[in-house]
Amino acid sequence: MTLNANCITSIELPLMEAFYTVQGEGAHQGKAAYFIRLAGCDVGCHWCDVKESWDANKWPSVAIESIVKTAEEYTARLAVITGGEPLMHNLTALTSQLKQANFTTNIETSGAYPLSGIWDWVCLSPKKFKEPVPEIFAHIDELKIIVYNKSDFEFAEKNYGLVKQSNNKKNVKFYLQPEWSRMSEINPQIVEYVKANPQWQISLQVHKFLDIP
């Protein structure tokens, strides 16, 4: 659990969407979860499938009390904060209220901004377009690299090394995930890479195969 106590409490956040579904990828794949997708991102992944989230001004600012109250209407007590790039916002107040409501709090982030919030699980998915702030590597539980072309394997090893240098957690998960539009070409490369480098596992976007949000 990580807390950045230097953040100023936010009372509203730009909310693109929030929905109850099943986590489709990474270490918590297959679990029922309430997703909170915050708007705003300046990382600029050209293959991003939620580019409509980039401009925070297009989406309403919603009180965190309302976000949490809606989350409580659903059965599961796993909340996944994603984006956009969620760490563009101060997440301490939101995660504090989620924890008070007995939620497990997970974040999916590129790490391009300093970590704020109280977290049970931090998934770092770094991007070449705007690389992570160095201090985030010590706090992550999961490293997930999106593989679009062969150079991403080198990028994966660079970030693997940064985690190993600064993270004392014993059970950090390391995933390679094919970019959805390039699966037919990339999948065989990932399979061979994982066979040769078994510190990595394969993550797939199972929710897309199952056609669920």
Image (cartoon, rainbow, N blue to C red):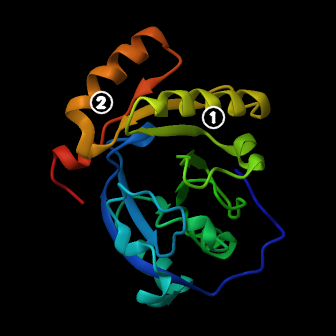
Q: Is residue 128 left or right of residue 208?
A: right
Residue 159, disc: 1
Q: Position of residue 29 (x, y in %)?
A: 36, 41
From the viewer's perspective, is residue 125 above or below residue 96? Answer: above
Secondary element at image label 2 = helix
Please, what is the three-letter code of the amino acid marked with disc 1? Asn
Q: Residue at x 76, y 59 (%)?
A: 3
Q: Is residue 4 left or right of residue 143?
A: right
Q: Which residue is mark 2?
A: 186
Q: Position of residue 168 (x, y in %)?
A: 76, 30
Q: Residue at x 56, y 38 (%)?
A: 142
Q: Residue at x 56, y 46 (%)?
A: 126
Residue 106, disc: none
For label 2, the crowd category at 10 Å Cα-Cα, with few meaning under 14, some 14 to 19 and many 20 or more, is some
Residue 59 is at least partly visible in this image = no
Please, what is the three-letter code of the amino acid marked with disc 2? Ile
Instruction: Calculate the distance from the C-alpha at mark 1 to the C-alpha at mark 2.
Output: 20 Å
From the viewer's perspective, is residue 89 above or below residue 161? Answer: below
